[in-house]
Image: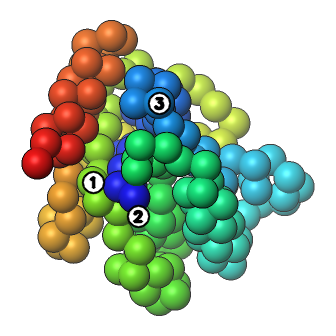
Amino acid sequence: MKKIVLTGPESSGKTTLAEQLAAHFGTVWVPEFSRRYLNELGRPYTADDLLAIAKGQMALEDGMASKATNGLIFMDTSLEVVKVWSEVRFGFCDEKIEQWLTQRPPDLYLLCLPDLPWSPDPQRENPNDRDMLLERYRKELREQNLAFSQVWGIGSARLANTITAVNDFLKP
């Protein structure tokens, strides 16, 4: 099973691309667990909630893996987002999240550039920090020596660029 994660700053098209890529490649995609969790929380989140979100994301990924076809699954975010989110919001990341991140590396990250217009959402917090967050994600991927391709463009060009990146990765 090849696991491909879409990552990057808020409002950079991760969910849309995950859904489009799954349709294009005839497989499934894993949604972002934190959206459901935070919608049901009923209070401001804490660092402990990020640990629960990480556990929920892993369980969701594991559950969806059995439904994947073509030996391929796309994930709308993964634990690297929880790590960066925790570091930015709380100044640290729980060591369990860091451990899980190293134990469950995807095969490819697609790093979405914030070249799309900001789209307001009640769960989004950083409309003015997307470039800084992009650098945090890029640094994290490089420090962990993880395979990644950058994703850019608007509309159908963004999807085409991303499909090309995935096809290049899948070539023997």
Instruction: Judge whether residue 88 can be spotted in this image.
Output: no
Circle nearer the N terminus (2, 3): 3
| Cβ atoms under marks 3 and 1 closer than 8 Å | no
Name above or below for residue 145 compared with residue 43.
below
Give the x, y percent position of residue 160: 25, 18
**SS label for mark 2:** helix
The quadrant in which residue 124 appears is: top right
Name above or below for residue 73 compared with residue 59.
above
Residue at the spot of label 1:
108
The quadrant in which residue 125 appears is: top right
| Cβ atoms under marks 1 and 2 closer than 8 Å | no
Circle nearer the N terminus (3, 1): 3
* Mark-to-mark CA distance, 1 and 2: 12 Å
**Label 1 Cα crowd, 10 Å radius (few <14 / some 14-19 / many 20+):** many
At label 2, the amino acid type is: Glu
**SS label for mark 1:** strand
Give the x, y percent position of residue 61: 57, 60
Q: Residue at x 56, y 57 (%)?
A: 65
Residue at the spot of label 2:
80
At label 1, the amino acid type is: Leu
**SS label for mark 3:** loop
* Mark-to-mark CA distance, 3 and 1: 18 Å
Q: Residue at x 24, y 38 (%)?
A: 166
Query: Mark 2 or mark 3: which is in front?
Result: 3
Q: Is the image coloured rainbow, by chain, by secondary structure, or in one colour?
A: rainbow
Residue at the spot of label 3:
26
